[in-house]
Amino acid sequence: MSNEITQVHPQPVQDKDIVDAEIAQAGFGYDEYPPSGKDVANIPANSYDVDPFSAQREENAEDYVDFRSMGWVQAGLVATAENIALGALSYPSIFLRLGMVGGLIANIGLGVLAYITAWIMIDFKMNHMGVMHFADAGGLLFGKWGRRILGAGMVAKSIGLGGSHVLAGKQALNTLSTNAICSVWFALVIMIVSVLMSTNREFGKLAPLSWLSVSCILIACMITIVATGVQSPSVLEKNGVPIQWHAAPTNPDLMDVIGALTNIVFAYGGNMGVFSWCSEMRNPNDFKKSFLITQAGGIIVYCIVGATIYAFGGQYVTSPAFTMTTKPVRITAYAFALVTILISGIVGLNVGAKYLYVNTFRKSRLLTSKGLRARLAWVAIILVMWIAAFVLAELIPFFNQLLTIVSSLFSVWFSYGLCGVIWFYNKHPYFAKDGEVREMRGFWSWFFMGCAILSIILSIAITPLGLYSAIEGIKEGYSAGTFKHPFSCS
């Protein structure tokens, strides 16, 4: 894809040697950046043209952590670890609700659209190198309240992801140990291990763990696919009803269809981290290649896992899918999945934690300091967020529905709707700044505008449908008495 719109704009900052250009562009009036001494604390925090990591390179010198160290392969691994996780094994149930053809079309279509919206975000980042996370994008688009609301959404979504991984990890340890102890202790173990594995502030340092996470979930998926394919149908069949799969949903229920579509949208919720990951790359524009790995891999894995296990299990598929298998197979699959549960949860929560860290220390040398104070500040943020994730996951009986509400309000907009708004702000002639020339010319101009409009419409539709699905789920849970009491050992 080439740059779809002819335009003239200031060149983005990508290298330490042109930091002075940022300052001239931002209009700070300093001869050098950052200014020496205590003036560093007076740099405006709402400047979206200045990359604060690069800006502190010379000032911190001996005490400098180079956050912008990731290559495109490392960034791709980190993003893939966030996107391809335990949720892959929920795809057979999505295919059950949408049918084989519907599941394939919805997954491929939404996956491709998520890649296009990520491309839009990266172009926006290249024009505004000071946009370090989605909250910064909100500040640029909508002012201080946009920044605050989207920042709160990032934190809420990250804590929600952490909580869901605490619950998934607890379930895995329960299965592996045959419920040896109260499951709350298992949840606490997952939280503590996650904190200990999150102490490094740089996303690049998570690349080796990300490789391990992706490898383990792929192994767990393969074990489940093979096991469901070779096991006797009698393991799943009930009352003599044979296993059947359908190209289209049979007797579709509105709640089931809505739930399946929102699950696919949320599966591509990794777009929330695009700005955060780009900000730690040597060349942020290379994230287009990184995210191609992520999205192509996600689409392929989701389609294979969803289609094959649905074909083998039919109407008897469960979520996660390895609960359809015999106990020895289930234990083996969970052992591999547990690694992914831990690492993927760390990557997801760190996106929100990095927003808090950058937002708090943007005007301080602590942002890029190697010192103990900076490291302790990061650990404190991580610790508070994981404690919140643990408490909320154990305290709220309808935590999964609560996560759906948060995702309906924010995830769909991070992955789709706001990206459409970003395209209009960044590319459409109507929003051109003084002295900037923009023209709608050629196929790609109209293609991206169509995708932007589609993304906005999709988000407008998914948000109320997701909220409706979550609220109905809460009602059904209470009426059926399926919700457990807070901090239940079962």
Image (cartoon, helix red, strand yellow):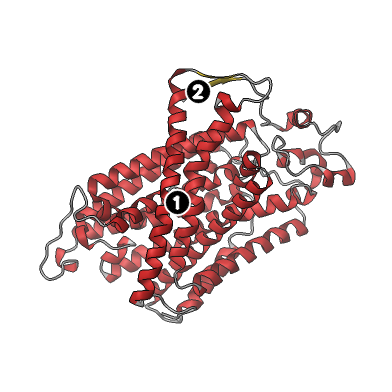
Q: Can residue 293 be seen in this view?
A: no
Of residue 437 and residue 246, the one placed in the foreground of this image is 437
x and y percentages locating residue 323 in the rendered image = 30, 66
Identify residue type, mark 1.
Thr
x and y percentages locating residue 4 in the rendered image = 50, 23
x and y percentages locating residue 199 in the rendered image = 64, 59
Asked if residue 125 is positioned above or below residue 378 in the image, the reply reads: above
Residue located 53% across and 47% down the image: 272
Q: Quadrant of residue 24?
A: top right
Q: Is mark 1 on a helix, strand or loop?
A: helix
- Image quarter of the C terminus: bottom left
Q: Circle 2 is placed at which residue position?
A: 4
Left or right of 312, for residue 209: right
Among all residues in the image, which is located at the extreme right? 37
Residue located 35% across and 75% down the image: 479
- Crowd class of label 1 (few under 14; some 14 to 19; many from 20; radius 10 Å): many
Left or right of 309, for residue 425: right
Q: Circle 1 is placed at which residue position?
A: 463
Identify residue type, mark 2.
Glu
Q: Residue 313 carries which label?
A: none
Left or right of 148, for residue 43: right
Q: Quadrant of residue 74?
A: top right
Q: Is residue 228 visible?
A: yes
Of residue 337 and residue 130, the one placed in the foreground of this image is 130
Q: Is mark 2 on a helix, strand or loop?
A: loop
- Crowd class of label 2 (few under 14; some 14 to 19; many from 20; radius 10 Å): some
Residue located 72% across and 58% down the image: 375
